[in-house]
Image (cartoon, rainbow, N blue to C red):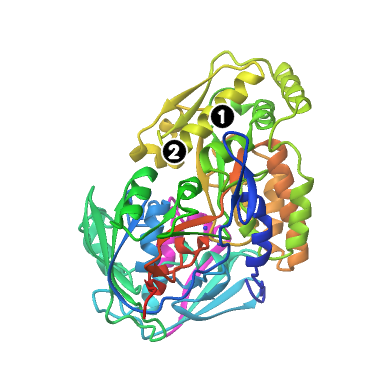
Amino acid sequence: MKKQHHPITLMIGAITASAFVLAGCSSSSEDDGGGDAAFDVPFGATTPAAAGPLDTVTWMLGGEPTTLDADIDATTADDTVLANVCDRLMQVQPDLTLGQGLASDAQWTDDTHLVFTIRQDALFHDGSPVSTADVLWSMQRHSAEGAAESDEYRNVVAIEQTGDDQITVTTSQPDAILLQAMAGDGGIVWNPRVIEAEGEDFGSPGSASACSGPYEVTSWDAGSQLTITKFADYWNSDVDALTNEIVFRWADETAIANSVTTGEAQGSFLENAGAARSFIESADVSVYQGPSTNAWVLETTDRGALTDERVRQALSLALDRTGVAAAAFGGLAQPWKTPVGSGAWGYQVDTFEQAYDALEGAPAKPSDADLAAAEDLISEAGVPSAPIVVASNGSSTHNVIANALVSAAQSIGLEAEITVIPQVQYGDFYSDPELRGQADLWPDEYYISKNDPLGFYKNGASDASVNFGVFADPEYDALVDEGYAATDDVERAAITIELQKRWVEHAVWIPVVATPSTLIMSNDVTGVPASAAFIYYPWAVDLGSTKG
């Protein structure tokens, strides 16, 4: 989720690789039995370039897409498809840098005016031209109150068409990350005529495409598979997709592994890095990892005992993150202190790394002193009258994290229990207060489309859409505004580090592990990015055969 006058040079790969060296990249990790397991996993932004074309590839997802309307929702499965189907104003690159999309140029003309030049040769999948007016309509839809991407427009006060090929965005203050946001779902350019014709059915199986990307959805059999096909009239002549058709299927991680093992599918960007462990020595399937902003966290709701930050702090101190990394991720993840991965460190990397190292309150493995401090916090807060309830969707990863939370609670004298929420409903925790009322916290993987940590820490502002009521601090709110206004990298890094410190101290969410992007792929195919860019970059255009 995601600058110039504010030119931010976004260089991540090498630093991020070193940050994840403990996560299993040519290193030794402790396995479930306490022994050492040496992993030699390639780490980088890309995989070897493809040498030849393919007719059809089957690609596995961790779940069925919920909707292809990103203004309603955008799960990882949704975005993995949409990345290939929908062009954005700007485009995340495989190394997580920022490139051009449907905007051929974007310039801040002063501190509060961002001018986009819109290319005039793009076509929607129905053959109609992508007009500047369509861009205006799309940005207004994204920024509308209640839209899933509206938080990306928090400082925007006006969006206007100011020329045949020009959109001018006016902000209430300088905004150091707005341009990056236009490479995420908040920058998708929609075909308004399709959306208006489809009405409430837009984004569901059978609805027409409203995008202009290099692939278009040609079928979606609900509960079975979704197919995207190369769009013959794609505007960008520099893009020549080698694969004609991608068939998406979905399953749990065990079935995904079986499908790739047997050759029924050719690859998958794994939601659980641990599912790749069995392929590390495979002669037929390769494992790749790359930079990402992803982190698994325990998100807290505004019910029950966890509204008291001392209880949240105590649970964070008692949580065995090393155990979770081993049990849930096979050592291919890293115990982590913050709610956003190191792929977000797109500038001032040494500064962010030093600040991260200095953080306290989220130990990799709790010491006796950590447990004693946690017990003292509970003594101050008082033992809750009801058990702490942690949700799980029943997947192995969610279950491991939920059970680790229960164990942490019990280790400091608290009762805790797990409630299972069906996977089809699980994403509704972000939008449904009644569902949040069923649990005190829930584990989930969270990521942002920007490699700037401010793009995450804005979520602690009092009016943020994912601040569910456990934290409110006027000083924090003021720092968020100052961070947006800080177009100087050194200044913005200092502000963001203070926000990070406050977030972790108050245990707004409880961080668990950071997960590099993890890809398994048949040795017959190659080319796709290994980084988390697959969530927003049209990765299928790089997919092809290993043979010429």
Q: Nearer the viewer, residue 277 or 244?
A: 277
Q: Residues within 10 Å of mark 1 (few under 14, many from 20)?
A: many
Residue interval drawn in magenta = 138-165
Question: Which mark is on residue 429?
Answer: 2
Identify residue for label 1: 404
Q: Is residue 12 visible?
A: no
Does the magenta-highlighted stretch encompass residue 147?
yes
Q: Amino acid at mark 1?
A: Ala
Q: Are marks 2 and 1 in contact (CB under 8 Å)?
A: no
Q: Residues within 10 Å of mark 2 (few under 14, many from 20)?
A: many
Q: Is residue 512 visible?
A: yes
- Residue 495: horizontal and vertical position, in percent? 75, 55
- Residue 403: horizontal and vertical position, in percent? 52, 27
Does the magenta-highlighted stretch encompass residue 437?
no
- Mark earlier in primary sequence (2, 1): 1
Q: Nearer the viewer, mark 2 or mark 1?
A: 1
Question: Which mark is on residue 387?
Answer: none
